[in-house]
Structure formats: structure tokens, C-alpha cells
Amino acid sequence: MPLTRSSGVLLHPTALPGPFGIGELGSHAEHWIDFLEASGQRAWQVMPLGPTGYGDSPYQSFSAFAGNPYLISLERLRTAGWLFDDDLEGVPFDDARVDYGHVIDFKLDRLTRAAQRFLRDASDETRGEFEAYCERHAEWLDDFTLFMALKEEHGGRSWDAWPAPLRDRAPAALDEARERLADEVVRQRLWQFWFDQHWAQVRAYASAKGVGIIGDLPIFVAYDSADTWANRELYFLDEKGVPTVIAGVPPDYFSDTGQRWGNPLYRWKRMAEDGFAWWLARIRATLHFVDVMRIDHFRGFAGYWEIPASEPTAVKGRWVKGPGQPFFDAVREGLGELPIIAEDLGVITPDVEALREANGLPGMKVLQFAFAGGPEDPYLPHNYEHNCVVYTGPHDNDTTNGWYAQAPGEERDFVRRYLARSDENVAWEFWRLASASVADTAVAPLQDLLGLGSEARMNTPGTAAGNWAWRFSWEMLPDWLAPQLRELAELYGRVPGEGAVDTPYRQSVTGTALED
């Protein structure tokens, strides 16, 4: 699906400013959208919005369908009457980074207070809205909220460590748990209701400003998730629910032992038997939140690296054929033509390229990857096709300034020659290069637009701590930034007009196929 020529900024909501230790879906999110509009940017790219699990990673979520309650706006809850001023006073947080341990304790305490007041004081009309939400989303909400209540009861332990009747979803054990944990379950449901409300307000505000949301859909789900627990038949698990094979990537230039991700692998043949119904539901749920979805590790649909779960590294794996074109035929038949960006980085073979091209999906280009080879390198802008999205760097990379500071001398020399510039402002020159390219969409992390170094890196793959914590403050945005961004967007034809734009970024998700 070709995208309309435009540009945008990559920033996860956790990195937004605000007084409560983590970005929220309130006034600061709307102020951010105002900045994007003033800058001539038509896209806001975010990472997965689900509830985070191990390592606070948005790519290891407890659900592929739910929203992250840590993003719920406490100021909106105060306006609604579910929190009071004294609930939000005297709480010092570090504005520069997310201290997840401190933030999670604080947020869950306030969200619990708000839930108690709602359940005690909500009007019949408001309760009706909540109950209607629960009914509309029951297909995933019932399992997810029970999963989270059980996880809380068991001290956060993974579901495979629960008592066997609960681990194996014995009907009598589940019925008893629903009754025993009824208060916890309704609290979890209410948090999802609020997340849905607050994100919908932010998204509507963005739409009115002509800004679309690019979301992220990881191809694999976390093992410790409601998705795996409630759908064991869809994954390669043994009789106790333990994975027999897991996902990852083979050894490459970046790692001698590859990457052992640990995600369970799908039984694609089993999924095909019902027309990939679980996947269609997942895509529909994703498009309830975003306008365009980037599929992370798209190559897994053509072929994926299967690692025996007993192996400590990714070395002893094998390539296994993915679902291929029948999957995309089923998606098209069930949901129509969809706004998808294919993350086609890494080991890309002809079958991956053929699958992407057969479905007209834009792939990704990364400027940080472009200067290790010669003039034929596919990441150099003079080799691009229109139907692609160019990034200065993705979320897993160092910032462009951080990357450049550590790049080999021959790469830095190639950069200077290609840009015909000195290296005083490489990150900004990369943004100019991306904006000027023929790629239909250009995206930069905010860190690159601010010229920040490695201290602002969002994630370092292979490290379990210290990631996903960076935040910005409004004081970090210089007065010249919005006008300069708009100048480049206008100069290179990436501002299609004023007001809301009718492009693939604003594709409706309220039609029959995608109806909520």
C-alpha cells in the first residue's frame, strides 16, 4: 500500500513530559501534537501500546490487545472526579528518565483509588458506558483481566508457575478464580476502559490536527502473556505449557551467538485452519488504536529462525517457512486493504522481498546502515524506491550522534563525502537527507532532531536493564526547531496541505470489516 509523501517523528508516549514520572495521555500529549502540526509533521510514530512486562519493554507485553495502564492520564481522572488534588500532590519524580519501580507503585496506587471511587460513585450512565465497553471487547478482555488478577495473586510469577488447574485453564478453577478475584478483575477492566477513552481523545485530537498515528505490531507475542495462556493450542508448547521452540535470529555481524528472544512460536498450520482468526482479531484491535501499523520482524511471515528452547543461544537454530501469501490473502479477505509498513531489516532473502512486493507494502530504510558498504548499498537514498519509509535510525539503535561518534573512520569519511558537509551536525543533516529522498515517508526519533548523544538512547538490544526510560522536557525544544522542521517539510514536498489530511494515515477503522 503506497503512502502519501509526508514525514513524522518517532516518540513513545512514555517519553512525554509530565509531573508523574512517565508520559501520559493527557494535555502533554496534545501539546506534543500541537508541536507536530506546527512543524509540518503528518505522522507520530509510537511503539507498542500494550501493558509492559519483563524489562519494561513495550515489545514484551502481557497482551497483544490491551493498553498500558501506566499511560492513563491522572489529570483526566482528576477532571472526571475519580482523583482529588491531594492524591497528586507532593510526588517528586525525575523528569529526565522513567524510574519504573517508583512510577509503577505510584500509578497503580492512584489508579486503584480512582477505581474504588468510580465503582462507588459512578452514575448509571457512566456505568452503562463502562459495561458497553466490556461487552464490545469481551473476546480478549475477559481472559486478559483474569490473567492479570491471577498474576497479581501469584506475586507476578509467570503463568506456567501457577497451580496446574489455573495454568491449564481447568473450567472449574477458572470459575472459582473469577468469583474469588471479582474485585481485581473489575479493576483491571476499568483501567482498560480508561486507557481506551484517553487514547481515543488523543487520537481524535491528532486527527483534527492532520496528524496520523503509526503504531507497531510485533510479529511475536510474549510467553508470559494472556495471549499465550489463553490460546496454548496456537503455539509450540508441551503438556505443561513450556515452549519447545522459541523465536530469535541467527548469528550475524552484530552478534556471534545471534539473538535468543524467547517468544513462543506459532503453529501456523493450526492458525490457517480457521482463516487466521486470532491474527485478524489482533490486527483489528491494533487498528482500533492507530492509523498505520508497522509489522516488526516482517520477515517472519516468509521464514523465521526456530531455536530449540533448551539451547542457551541462537546458534543452533534453523530456518522454517512462514505462512507466506495465504496469510495476507486471509487478511485482505477479512479486513480489506490495510495500512501496513513492513519492517524488513536484518537477514532479508529474496522470498521476503517477494512477499512484501506482492502485497505492495512499503519497507524500511535506515540511514545509519547506509555507509558501511559502497554506492550500491540499498540504504543509500539514491537507491530508494518511492514506496518505502526512511528512518535516520530506529528505536533499537543508538542516536545518530551516538552512532556517528563510535562509527569506524571509513564510515564517517563516507558520510562526510556523501553529505558534502562537515560532521558538526550529522543528525540534522541525516534528517535533511531523509526529507529530500524519494521515500514516501521520512521518520526521525525526536532524539535525532534534538541532536542528542548516546545518553538519550531508548533501547540497547541484549541488555535487560536501563532501557525504555528516556524522556524529554519542553525546555529541550528550541524555538527554532518547529519552524526549521516545517521549512524542510515544505521544501521537500512533505506537507500536503493544511488541516486534516485524507491519506492512508487517516484510514477509517469504523467500517464493517474493522468495526469496533
Image (spheres, rainbow, N blue to C red):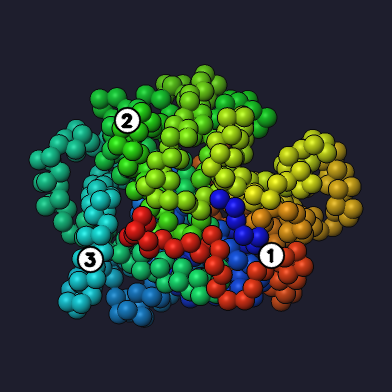
The amino acid beneath tag 1 is: Arg
Identify the mark at residue 270; answer none if there is no mark.
2
Q: Amino acid at mark 2?
A: Arg
Q: CA distance from mark 3 to mark 2?
A: 32 Å
Q: Measuring 51% from the left and 20% from the top, which residue is drawn there?
A: 318
- Image coords of residue 155 (percent x, y): 28, 46
Question: Foreground mark, 3 or 2?
Answer: 2
Q: Secondary structure at mark 2?
A: helix
Q: Which of the 4 image quarters holds residue 352?
A: top right
Q: Is residue 74 above or below residue 267?
A: below
Looking at the rendered structure, the kind of residue marked 3 is Ala
Secondary structure type for disc 1: loop
Crowd rating for badge 3 (residues with CA inside 10 Å; few <14, some 14–19, many 20+): few
Q: Provide the residue designation for mark 1.
A: 494
Residue 296: image location, x then y, percent? 52, 43
Quick one: 296 or 337, which is closer to the camera?
A: 337
User: On residue 156, which mark appears?
Assistant: none
Q: CA distance from mark 3 to mark 1?
A: 41 Å
N-term-proximal mark, 3 vs 1: 3
Q: Are marks 2 and 1 in contact (CB under 8 Å)?
A: no
Tell me: residue 239, above or below residue 406.
above
**Residue 55, visible in the rendered structure:** no
Q: Label 3, on which residue?
A: 132
Q: Is residue 43 left or right of residue 175?
A: right
The image quadrant of residue 126 is bottom left
Say which label, 2 or 1, has the lower sequence index.
2
